[in-house]
Amino acid sequence: MKKIALLAMAIALFSSCNNSTKEHKTAKKVSTNIKNNIQMKKVLFVLTSHEDLGNTGHKTGFWIEEFAAPYYLLKDHGIAITVASPKGGQPPIDPKSNEADFQTPATVRFNKDKETQEILSKTLKLVDINHNDYDAVFYPGGHGPLWDLAEDNNSITLIEDFYKNNKPVAAVCHAPAIFKHTKNQEGAPLVSGKKVTGFTNGEEEAVQLTNIVPFLVEDMLKDNGGIYSKKEDWASYAVEDGLLITGQNPASSELVAEILLKRLK
């Protein structure tokens, strides 16, 4: 009888341990699934392919800080990032953004990061991008977008597709130039009645390019009905209105990414 009791206790203990193990495995699986769901979020970065600064003979392109800071912030939080540009391949880097005065922890990290440099050298062509593959789109600035992305039909269609499918569209500094021709589903400018910001007229004047750029970002956003706001020149400032997230200048790039990250989670 004693042996039977001991056997029953052993069976009960084994069953308890087995159930505990199963529960642990189930909890671990749920935790892993939650983590994977966060990591599965995908953001498309779109960079300019334009390198000529008007007729000045100088070069432009995208501003490294405005790519690197958002890129690393999102990547470090488990977001998968794909990079595209109108022409594909290596997008032009604004040479001024490589100067010592404009270095930040993000640009220093980028300059040592061969893996990301390799990714950047092989951007996908914008014409081959489908919004269905991504959860949001981010446009870094630099003066280049004023010439190509503002007028690029593939970019315009892509932005409108993201927006009408309830996906965030983020842009910083000169990149809000992408809203020059974009429309909402009613046919009005996409920024009409929306709170937005972007590179200020004062900041453009400070870099002495007011008469070189094809248009001023601040003026264009206002002309398209955007509710434009700004802080003092070169201050960090970002605005979120529905699906639109915009930043004023290079100092605002990480702030825009932080807002986007909150939306994705």
Image (cartoon, rainbow, N blue to C red):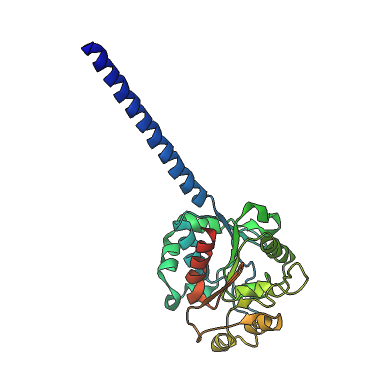
| Position in image of residue 104 (x %, y %) | 42, 71
| Position in image of residue 70 (x %, y %) | 50, 65
| Position in image of residue 123 (x %, y %) | 60, 57
Which one is in front, 86 or 46?
46
Q: Is residue 16 visible?
A: yes
Image quadrant where one finds the N terminus: top left
Q: Is residue 141 left or right of residue 150?
A: left
As drawn, 40 above or below 174 = above
Which residue lies most toward the left here? 2
Residue at x 43%, y 73% (from the top left corner): 103
Which residue lies most toward the right here? 187
Residue at x 51%, y 67% (from the top left corner): 259
Which residue lies most toward the front here? 1
Residue at x 67%, y 61% (from the top left corner): 162
As drawn, 39 above or below 19 = below
Which one is in front, 132 or 53?
132
| Position in image of residue 199 (x %, y %) | 58, 80
Which one is in front, 42 or 173?
42
